[in-house]
Amino acid sequence: MRQLIQSPEKTLNVMDAGTTMRFLVAYHAIRGENKIMTGTPRMLERPIKPLVDALRTLGADVRYLGHEGFPPVETRGFARQRSNRIEIPGNISSQYISALMMVGPLLPDGLTLHLTGPVASAPYIKMTAALMTQFGITPQLDLPEIKVPHGEYRPAEVTIEADWSAASYWFAFMALAERGEVMLPHVASNSLQGDRVIVDVMGQLGVETQFLKEGARIIKKPVSISTLVWDFKDCPDLAQTVLPVCAALGVAGDFVGLESLRIKETDRIAALKQELHKINGRLDEPQAGHWRLTPGTLPKEPLWINTYHDHRMAMGFAPLATRMPLAIQDPTVVEKSYPDFWADMKRVGFILTGI
């Protein structure tokens, strides 16, 4: 594990990769390595305080080099383990929790995590535990408590699942298409990924899923609802896929679990409000934590979609091209998670220029 990610460079620039930032800060801190972790201007606005506080409690020397609570940070060393129990909020980012789980075995006394408040993105925590088990460490999950024993990771062969987050955009294309079907290869029904629930969401929005040996076949069907009610607590990355589809189909929305969207690549709630307004949709928060989507009539003129340096804004709104001409600002943002996205759109018949 150390060989795979150790770098001779002192300063590591993770660009806009939040997962990389959180995981490597924890890794280098517990290893006692002197590293500076930095990133894009937006990354330097994304909070890291809960993780740094936890690492300091464990005995790591981690220092902020800019604004308190935000990157860039410097890991300066780890003298000894001062605690084997950490309390950390469960409703801010599962990446903090996964980062601590994965370094827990490196601690002489292991680690017990107690998650305070509601637990968001629980499937990602379970997925982390399942992968750790494949590499020889078995955390005990009894949420809100997680126990990670001291131990050594061992090499293992694993098959990496197809990405359900990337697959979700093809459900959106199908929901907005007049007819058709698409085969998504290597997509597994029994996935641990939280975004696998796109099957259930889009089942209400006119997409039938058939799981076959070679993958998932999705087929256009009639929309069965006038209002979608959904809790995105365990699948926040699907919001930018689902909300534009609802607005375009004329389906109202009643949503909770969107709070973590404010600290992603952009403030995704603000971005969604702005871009949904362009298709005459309105996203309101009538009470704290409760969101309502009101659709309107789709405009006839071509749309310019801003991406806010966020890959999911580009891919979440791209399926609107089934209904109207689109222009996407900074299409290169998809390189973060799905670099072949535009090529795949061309493969199914879309005409793209400037990409």
Image (spheres, rainbow, N blue to C red):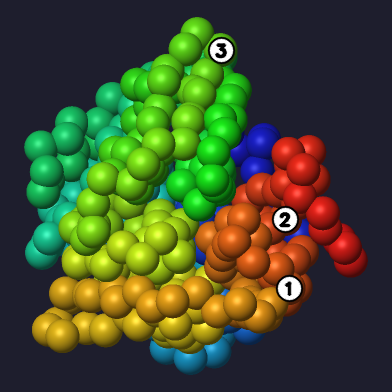
Q: Are marks 1 and 2 in contact (CB under 8 Å)?
A: no
| Mark 1 element type | strand
Q: Quadrant of residue 244?
A: bottom left
Give the numbered dot on residue 12: none
Which residue sits at x=82%, y=58%? Answer: 352
Which residue sits at x=89%, y=66%? Answer: 354
Q: Is residue 254 visible?
A: yes
Cα distance between the residues tagged 3 and 1: 34 Å
243 up-or-down from 85: above or below:
below
Position of residue 138 in the picture relative to residue 187 (left or right): left
Q: Quadrant of the C terminus?
A: bottom right
Total numbered badges shown on the rendered structure: 3
Give the numbered dot on residue 335: 2
Position of residue 344 in the picture relative to residue 259 (left or right): right
Cα distance between the residues tagged 3 and 2: 26 Å
Question: Disc 1 marks which residue?
Answer: 327
